[in-house]
Image (cartoon, grey):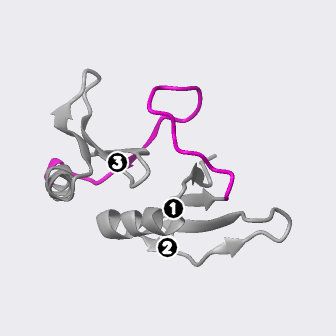
Amino acid sequence: MRIAHSALWTKDLDAAASFWERYFGATVGGPYRSKRREGFVSRFVHLPGGADEIELMTGPWIEAAPKQEHVGWDHIAVSLGSREAVDELARRCAGDGCLASGPRITGDGFYEAVILMPDGTLVEITE
């Protein structure tokens, strides 16, 4: 058993797609426009080297994400394969203003940093 894909709502589909291309080297598919749900558009993000996929979704009814913790998915974590890769991406994101939390070893032993998608969605980058 495996997770086929995860899905994220976003207000700006193109900015979200560009984020995954820029920082993860992902390939992003073209837009799918629903014929049954007016205004729904999605694009699939394909991460390099595997079958991992993220569906980015939008529609005119989407509101800004709450600024506090709330029920539902909190973040996605992407393993980059090494501490050096985490450090390098964290440096790039710091320079671009989207680093939320610099590299550190967490209480449960993970080496990670946290970056932000354009709409504020959290993405952990781990070794």
Judge whether 72 appears above or below 63 on screen.
Answer: above
Instruction: Tell me which label, 3 or 2, sits earlier in the chain.
Output: 2
Give the residue type that dot 2 points to: Val
Q: Nearer the viewer, residue 87 or 36?
A: 36
Taking the view exactly as shown, the residue that stands out farthest to the right is 36
Q: In front of the other: label 3 or label 2? A: 3
Q: Position of residue 5 (x, y in %)?
A: 59, 54
Q: Is residue 66 visible?
A: yes
Instruction: Tell me which label, 2 or 1, sits earlier in the chain.
Output: 1
Give the residue type that dot 3 points to: Leu
Q: Within 10 angstroms of label 1, few (less than 14), some, or many (20 or more) residues?
A: some
Q: Which mark is residue 73?
A: none
What span is in magenta? 60-84
Q: Is residue 127 visible?
A: no
Q: Nearer the viewer, residue 45 or 38?
A: 38
Q: Which residue is mark 1?
A: 12
State the separation of the CA atoms marked 2 and 1: 14 Å
Q: Which mark is residue 116?
A: 3
Q: In front of the other: label 3 or label 1? A: 1
Could you tell me which residue is drawn at 58 percent across and 78 percent down?
Answer: 30
State the separation of the CA atoms marked 3 and 1: 14 Å
Instruction: Tell me which label, 3 or 1, sits earlier in the chain.
Output: 1
SS label for mark 2? strand
Give the residue type that dot 1 points to: Asp
